Amino acid sequence: MRNKFLIAAMASMILAGCTNDQQMLDEAMSAKEIRFAVASGTEQTRAEHDIDGSYSGDLKIWAWVKGTNSAIIDGDVYNAASNTFAENKIYYYPIDGKQLDFLAVPNELITKGYFVDPDRGNTGETDYRFTVGHDSHASEHHNTDLMTSEVITQSTGVVGIVLRHLSAKLNVRIQQVQKQNEVTTCVVKLNKVELQDLKNTGYVDLDENWTAVNNGDDCFWTNIEAAKVCDWTILDGANFALATHTPTDPNTPYTTENPHYVVPQQLDPAGQKLYMEYTIETKYISGNQPDVVEKFKKELDLSSITAVPAWAMNKNITYIISINPMEESHKITFDVEVEAWGNQTGETTVTPGDSENI
């Protein structure tokens, strides 16, 4: 009997609530709490990511009503360990069922000053500003990830946020392709390799479908601060031998140990360059002539490699430099590999530049 009384009392309270404020009850009954599930994106591979499976770090999260700058979640920190907001807030979808655009950024990017809070315009486009540090910070940039914007309606309780790289990743591989002919054996030794005049600060406008202002899937930043440039010294003062004078020994390519993360940018004929200094040691098989040692300097305009007109977001780019000291004028070719662009490659042939006997 007591149980029946309690149930009746509860029913009376609910009925009274409906009578006093029907709209409040409707909202409470219809509201869906926003929860988050975070995983690495389908385009990512472990080679691109230090993330194998779900992301475990804290996130800073925004959510706007689709197509407006009306914030539902305004940059609050989400604690991934406890699956809660650090401020102990709970958020719900709008009662009218409007769609929300979600954006999340790993919190360490903001606390270290790499990423600036996004600016949401009235039209619903989001302006991102990001600064890639100089070489001393290169090792920290493996976490330069940006969550893709997800557009979710009220009918879904869980927001599946997918990690995408905001940056592009550059690698360099240099190899010797031949070392012997009928007369001589040659060894190429690297002395200095640099990527020069990389633009390291800028911003881009992206919509909720991750489409940049260039209306392409391979997004790059169009608003680059031209004065903010830096160089990436890949190799300096070394004497890295790509081969030996022994014909049966295999060649040994030089590969960057740590990739470089850059602001995605369109390559400019007056901008980004690859600079190389290398030495060629030539021995004559007959032994009738003395050995020759020559030092070469070469600067390549990277925009001349037409297969990669831009360093795009979320792309892993490897430049492959092949030096053949046995050909006339020491032919150099440049290929490129781009992960997630398939097997697209491009080649350009250049002269080796000025030489000086040493």
Image (cartoon, grey):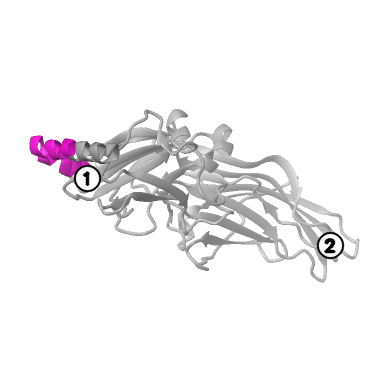
- Identity, as a three-letter code, of the amino acid under mark 2: Asp
Q: Would you call the spot at circle 2 few (<14 residues within 10 Å), some (14-19), or many (20 or more)? A: few
Q: Is 344 in front, or is 238? A: 344
- Identity, as a three-letter code, of the amino acid under mark 1: Met
Return the disc, 2 or 1, that comes first in the chain's sequence: 1
Q: Dot 1 corresponds to which residue?
A: 29
Bounds of the magenta segment: 12-28
The residue depicted at 53 percent of the width and 55 percent of the height is 317
Residue 313: give x, y in percent of width and height: 43, 51
**Left or right: 247 as drawn, with respect to 29:** right
Residue 249 circle label? 2
Residue 145: give x, y in percent of width and height: 46, 44
Residue 25 part of the magenta segment: yes
Q: Secondary structure at mark 2?
A: loop
Which residue is the extreme one toward the bottom? 182
Residue 122 visible:
no
Which residue is the extreme one toward the left? 19
Give me the C-alpha separation between circle 2 and circle 1. 75 Å
